[in-house]
Image: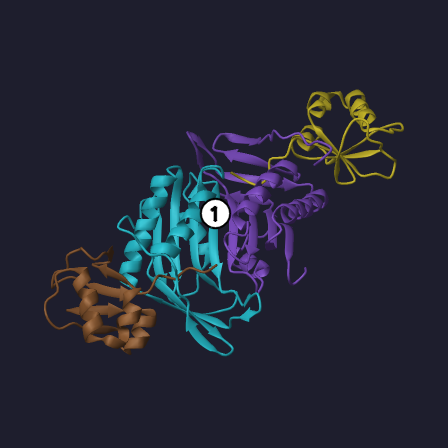
Chain colours: A cyan, B purple, C yellow, D brown
Amino acid sequence: MSAETPTLIEITHAPIDLNALQRAITTPRDGAVVLFTGTVRGQTGELETVQLEYEAYTEMALAKLRQVAEEMRARFPLIHGIALVQRIGTMDVGEPTVAVAVSAGHRGDGAFEAARYGIDRLKQIVPIWKKEVRPDGSAWVEGDYMPTARD
Amino acid sequence: MSAETPTLIEITHAPIDLNALQRAITTPRDGAVVLFTGTVRGQTGELETVQLEYEAYTEMALAKLRQVAEEMRARFPLIHGIALVQRIGTMDVGEPTVAVAVSAGHRGDGAFEAARYGIDRLKQIVPIWKKEVRPDGSAWVEGDYMPTARD
Amino acid sequence: MRVKLFATLKEKAGAPEIVLQGAVSTVAEVRQRIAEQYPHLAALAARSIVAVNHQFAFDADPVRPEDEVALFPPVSGGAA
Amino acid sequence: MRVKLFATLKEKAGAPEIVLQGAVSTVAEVRQRIAEQYPHLAALAARSIVAVNHQFAFDADPVRPEDEVALFPPVSGGAA
């Protein structure tokens, strides 16, 4: 990792530690960190979810996470640190499943926009799938994005 | 705190724990949390900062943080949980000084925008001041926002 | 009437609050009395903010003896 | 040629990979052979994504014997 523009990419079975992510990507030039985390939603309207199980095509997912980080830097050149972490395995309601963190000198330097872009792209091109465990059984969640040659 | 729309408001001397904030504001209906944290910037161009010292008019700051949370809910009605935490006392480079966290069902429900609005308003109307400790002395940082009757 | 001070104002005054002699009934009078009774704070006070009972207050706003009055510079909390 | 499978496809096949008989030289041929040799996967495979060496691949793209080929449904990672 460059000390000036650290990039942390991880697919992990371990719980995501937001404090550690903040420390890992904050450089001495940074005054702002934006962190998005996806969590296991227990209620979606009337539907109840008990757990989520995540599976990854790990080698390709790491390559695609690196690509997402590069795209973020190309679009938001003032940002400094980036963390893209996906947890895999079984997670309970309320637990963070994915985190996108971005640091920058000031809050107006694109950290909010870069974090939003990062989670949007992650959900399009990073090969990870989730299975919902409901009280009455479990089912894979189907994505709907079909990649093109530019992805 | 309402279980459906928890609001956590705090002025504290203790280090800010981002994991605890995420847990505190994530309800079973939430799949997305956006967290902004301001950190002590050590380098601003050529200027070097060693520490920041924060002082608050605590009773008024708590009232104004509650007002910021209400404004966030009025503008972004789909958000669920809100945390607004300002640490006071002396902090080193890289440490979180302030955190604004917002939870919502989905990432498109306004959590990014609400977090940005929250930190912007906090820096306008919450009576907290910082003093920069530099290698050659220390000085209060002057804000520039003059409140109006609508603040 | 007591007036709480913060940040630069507290440092300049050397105390977390000052006491104004005589009755005051508006925010404008608070500012005027500070300038008269604490001349070394006058310049700073002119560009400071007044709060009454934890809300921002302006020259025409009333001040009663039981109110909590504070004087402070524009805020600079948060970070970044 | 081996083809790695993920999510629904892995579950339906009952294995993390399948082996295709005969030479294949394009992504289109990979899809065709799966449909012929694993008919119970044909419907799913038709709306699945092919990756070659960790990059998305399309019908006209070449496939060499040493390539890592994978077949999987549209991704659904992240959350929210």
Q: Is residue A25 left or right of residue D54?
A: right
Q: Position of residue A144 (x, y in %)?
A: 39, 59
Amino acid type at mark 1: Val
Q: Residues within 10 Å of mark 1 (few under 14, many from 20)?
A: many
Q: Residue A10 lies in what quarter of the image? A: bottom left
Q: Is residue A64 toward the left or the right of residue A53 in the image? A: left
As rendered, which of B135 and A24 lies closer to the eye?
A24
Q: Position of residue A49 (x, y in %)?
A: 51, 71
User: Which residue is at 51% across, 73% downward?
Assistant: A50
Q: Is residue A62 above or below residue C4?
A: below
Q: Nearer the viewer, residue C22 or A104?
A: A104
Measuring from the top left, give residue B58's x and y in whole percent: 69, 44
Which residue is tagged 1? Answer: A34
Q: Who's the residue at 39% across and 42% down the image?
A: A80
Q: Picture quarter containing residue C14?
A: top right
**Residue A106 in view (yes/no):** yes
Badge count:
1
The image quadrant where one finds the C terminus of chain B is top right
